[in-house]
Amino acid sequence: MSFFHSINSRSSKSYSKPSPSSGVRSSQFKLRQYAEATLGSGSLRQAVRLPEGEDKNEWLAVNTVDFYNQINMLYGTVTEFCSPQTCPEMKATDEYEYLWKDNDKFKRPTTLSAPDYIEHLMNWVQSYFENEAVFPSKIGVPFPKNFQQIIAKIFKRLYRVYAHIYCHHFEIITQLGIQPHLNTSLKHFIYFIQEFDLVDRKDFGPLTEFVDKMVADGKTK
């Protein structure tokens, strides 16, 4: 199975990267080009920094979409091994169970299987992307005042997918040869949330020591 396998087999829709022709802000397209160029330089710390003179909310928006796509693709590689039977709860070790709440269908924290939780999570994030009041695509339309709070909540929940993959599917990830991709993606994610203070360290849960070491030694393992 290749790194790009099985994302198409997931029932949830993925949020494809916008292009200038789709009506997305041209500034966001330029920021995406900048992000890809800095990533290509090999410096993840440099890649997460706000480009000089650019709008912080625009940068947060572009990177949120890109991390969503990364995580969606990474989880897609293990979907056939992650089912309601193998993963009846959304956990990261038996010590951490993540309950779903969206103030819509699930008004109270609810136990879901891992694939159901992640399905709801991806659709929940997608709903923000499609909401012009939150992720405006037209030039001149401002971001909401609480945009960073929304982004922080999205990143806090997206992190849980990494935690589940590492704690419950890492053997498969290793067998598939995807471990370097997963580690690099997580390290990039951690640098970004640290740069903009989006997720508290206490929310790293069972990966706290692993994340601390990954960031401290500056190497992807």
Image: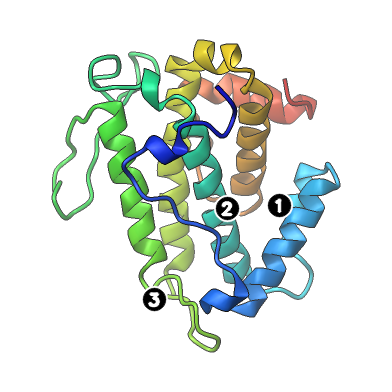
Q: Return the residue at label 3.
A: 132
Residue 50: give x, y in percent of width and height.
Answer: 72, 62
Res. 139 image quadrant = bottom right
Q: Is residue 105 left or right of residue 193?
A: left
Residue 89: give x, y in percent of width and height.
Answer: 25, 23
Rounded to the nearest whole Å, what is the CA distance between mark 1 and mark 3?
25 Å
Q: Return the residue at label 2.
A: 66
Q: Earlier in the sequence, mark 2 or mark 1?
A: 1
Residue depicted at x 46% and y 77%: 136
Q: Residue furthest bottom?
A: 140
Q: How many other residues sit within 10 Å of disc 2, few (<14), some (14-19) or many (≥20)? A: some
Q: How many other residues sit within 10 Å of disc 3, few (<14), some (14-19) or many (≥20)? A: some
Residue 21: give x, y in percent of width and height.
Answer: 58, 77
The one nearer the camera, 198 or 172, is 172
Q: Return the residue at label 1.
A: 48
Q: Quadrant of the N terminus?
A: top right
> What residue type is disc 1 on?
Val
Front: mark 2 or 1 = 2
Asked which secondary structure carries label 2, the reply is: helix
Q: Quadrant of the C terminus?
A: top right
Tell me if residue 23 comes above or below residue 88 in the rendering: below
Asked which secondary structure carries label 1, the reply is: helix
Q: Is residue 102 left or right of residue 187?
A: left
